[in-house]
Image: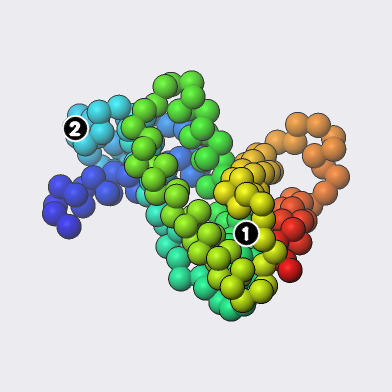
Amino acid sequence: MSMLDAKKSFIVSEAARQFSTKPVKDVTVKDIAAAAGVGEATVYRYFGTKGELIVACAEMLEREVYDVFIDKVAPTPAIKAIERFYGAYLVIFTERTYLYRFLSDFDAYAINEGVDKLDSYADAIDGYKCAFLEAYERGLSDGSVREQENIELFYYSTTHALISLCKKLASDMPVIRQDLFTEKQNEISTLISIIIGALRK
C-alpha cells in the first residue's frame, strides 16, 4: 500500500470511528480531519464531499463485516452454514450495535443529501447474497434445505427484514411503550428462527 493509500485509509478509519459514536449528520469534516491529524483540505483532496467519505466508510465496514462474519463460513450440512449466515446479524448486533446505527444514518443521509456513487457499495453487498446462495445450493444437494419457489425473493425479504429490525432495535430510544416489552436480542433470535424454520427440510 502506498503512502497516499495508507493516509486515505487512515482518514476513512478515523471517520468510521467518529460515526460509531455520533450520528453521521453531527460529524463534520473538520471533526474527521482533526481526529486524523490532517487539514480539512487534505480530506477534501481524497474525498470530494462528505458524502463520498461516508460511502467509503460504509464500504470499509461492509468489507470488515464480511471478512469477520461471512467469509469462510461453510460447515456441513449446508443448513448449518445458513444458520450461521443469519446468526451473524445477531452477533453483529450484540458485539457491534453501532454498525446498525450507522446503517440507519447512512440510509437517511444518502436519501436526504442525494449521495451518489453507491454502485461499488452495492456490488460489495452482493457478496453476502453469493455466500447465501452457495450454501442454499449445497443444502438442496445434501437434503438439509427445503426448496424455495423464488430463492432471491426469499433472500432479499429475509435479509431486509432482519436489517430493518436490527436498525430499529439499535436505536437507544424506544418510540412507543411496546418497544419495552421484549429483550432486543430475543426479538432478533426469534426472527432468525422463523427464517431458518422456513428453510430447514
Give above or below for 158 relative to 193.
above
- Label 1 secondary element: helix
Q: Residue at x 82, y 49 (%)?
A: 182
Quarter of the picture containing the C terminus is bottom right
Earlier in the chain: of badge 2 and badge 1, it is 2
Side of 1 relative to 69 (left or right)? left
* Image vertical order of residue 138 relative to residue 132, above or below: below
Q: Is residue 170 visible?
A: no
Which residue corresponds to mark 1? 86
In this view of the protein, can residue 111 be seen by the observer?
yes
- Of residues 159 and 139, the one nearer the viewer is 139
Q: Residues within 10 Å of mark 2 (few under 14, many from 20)?
A: few
Residue 200 locus on image (x, y percent): 72, 66
Report if the CB atoms under discs 2 and 1 are less than 8 Å apart.
no
Q: Is residue 3 above or below residue 199?
A: above
**In the displayed image of the protein, which residue is found farthest to the bottom?**
76
Residue 189, percent from left and from top: 73, 58
Residue plotted at (70% across, 64% down): 146
Question: Residue at image x 85%, y 35%?
Answer: 177
What residue would you read off at disc 2? 45
Please name whichever residue, 128 or 92, is drawn nearer the observer in this view of the structure.
128
User: Which mark, by number, is residue 18?
Assistant: none
Closest to the observer, 48 or 160: 160
Amino acid beneath label 1: Tyr
Q: Residue at x 58, y 78 (%)?
A: 76
Q: Tell me which amino acid carries mark 2.
A: Arg
Coordinates of residue 186 in the picture (x, y in percent): 77, 56
Q: Position of residue 10 (x, y in %)?
A: 28, 49
Numbered disc 2: secondary structure: helix
The answer to which of 5 and 121 lies nearer the viewer is 121
Q: Quadrant of residue 115?
A: top left
Q: CA distance from mark 2 to mark 1?
A: 39 Å
